[in-house]
Image: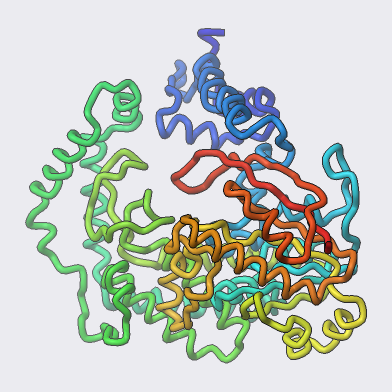
Amino acid sequence: MKSELLSIGQASQWASDYLDRPVTTSNISYLIQYAKISRYLDTDKKTKIKLQELKQYYDENIKVKHESWKDKLGKDLDWGLSFSNLRESDTTKHVHRLHPYKGKFIPQLVEYFLDSHLNDYKKQIYFKAGDTILDPFMGSGTTLIQSSELGLNSVGIDISDFNCLIAKTKLDDYDFVTLNESLQNVLSKTSNFSQQVFDDAFDIQLKNKLNEFNKKHFPNPEFKNKIRRNELNEDKYAEEKLKLFFKENEEFFRKNGTKDKTILLDEKRMSIFLAKWFSKRVRQELFYYLKTIEQEKDEKIRNMMKIVLSRTARSCRATTHSDLATLKEPQTGPYYCSKHKKICTPLNNIITHLRRYTIDTIERIKEFSKIKRNVFHGVIHADSRETDIFKEIKKQNPAFFKLLNSKKIDGIFSSPPYVGQIDYHEQHAYAYELFEIERKDDKEIGPLYKGQGNRAKRDYIEGISKVFKNINKFVKEDGDFFIVANDKYNLYPEIAEKSGLKIVEQFKRPVLNRTERDRQPYAEIIFHMKKA
């Protein structure tokens, strides 16, 4: 076994069998690229991997970790609910990746409780086609999307106007010929504007200079292997080489990347946030696209353009690759990238991402349109503590209101904010500024900025309880409430009592596949509640 060499395809198959889950050739290539395992060449110069090294990697990073996680999180976990066998492409299928959103649950978790399957843990079917599901903390609309797949009507409520925009664009129906023409047209206009105003030669030369410098001073995978073996001081070495790069290219950086200043857009209306977190070229391109959006007459297409632009803006902020999810300090020039182990530079134009996301958006909407069912759905921008759900639905869809008024809502599936973890408005600050959307940060329940102290916990209990008490009025007497929570402070028993609910069952799931920099596992509890 020690000397057995595998091709990338063979390694993919072996790892899939060993871990009992799909491991793609891309997964294996990633391990090689980031020097997690060594790359070998056979006599034909083809890439090979040592089976022993691959097994050792998975033993140390997957199998042993899972055992330690069991010790840390407890033995009463439903490991089937970890969904660790799923690929990222499964958990971000069709419209679930239309726009980034921190703190959302995966669609398979929603589907698990809403569909008709049974197993050793789920011993009862709770909902059937034609029922109505409510999510009072809708976020980006995952519950509504999965309800639509399963033939369930749905209602979502959110205090964030931008969250409502994301959910609506996912759920709306489109004429795909018109949608494609409109999105391609605004893309083409923005690309032409960029080419007229800015000098691409500067960015191309910078990229070439970085490539040559990185090949010489940060060769891959040799440099990553040295770090892995602790053969050099990464921080010290990187600092020295970054200084050297700037010294060697002093004259180059004095150049101006703008070739026609007369066409530049007026930046007076741009907010402080946009000026801080986007380069001048990116700001100009974003605002040109935005001005073009304003000329679109179809509201649904206009909303979709906003989602494409917002997704693009998020990817093009002036920050390091490792800090895209949580902004720290603006990064305006080349820097040592701890993620890629070389000198990188922030993106200086939006066109590549704009083109990619335009195509991707159309494909995802088309894919979802083929599987979603002909059901009712409603998105309400309001405070769940006080909104009259039926009144709001009546404004949007009288037929849906008639159904709800006659049989009420059948159940809840929701993941309320976790106390003191995320500022939900702030994560999309760039979008609120771009589209001049009113923020309601003061209405958030359990935001990060309030912390996790005793006062914050009391406010959280009060806020969630008010939501549950309000929505109780619209749910049928024997309705089922499924609440996903990271209840490390044991707040939900009190919340249930204050809300006129009782906890009848709990499902404990390990959360293993973290996407943020904090990869520590934790356990979520899905509380099954009924009216007391």
Task: Say which quadrant the N terminus sits in.
Answer: top right
In which quadrant of the rendered view does residue 164 lie? bottom right
Q: Nearer the viewer, residue 532 or 50?
A: 532
Q: How many marks?
A: 0
Residue 200 in the image, given as x and y percentages of width and height: 27, 65
Query: Farthest residue in the top direction?
Result: 2
- Quadrant of residue 408 within the rendered picture: bottom right
Is residue 144 visible in the rendered structure shown here?
no
Left or right: residue 508 versus residue 339 is: right
- What is the x, y in percent for residue 281? 29, 71
In this picture the colour scheme is: rainbow
Q: Residue at x 76, y 84 (%)?
A: 393
Q: Which residue corresponds to the image point at 46% horizontal and 17% vertical from the top-left?
A: 42
Evaluate whether residue 31 shows in this view.
yes
Q: Would you say 244 lies left or right of 16 here?
A: left
Q: Is residue 126 left or right of 301 when viewed as pictured?
A: right
Q: Is residue 447 above or below residue 123?
A: below
Q: Position of residue 454 (x, y in %)?
A: 49, 57
* Left or right, 124 with reference to 259: right
Q: Is residue 76 above or below residue 116?
A: above
Identify the image quadrant of the C terminus: bottom right
Q: Quadrant of residue 64?
A: top right
What residue is rendered at 12% in x and 57% in y?
252
Query: What's the residue at 9%, 47% (across, down)?
Result: 248
Residue 100 position, x and y percent, is 53, 61
Residue 365 lies, with reference to residue 486, above or below; the image says: below
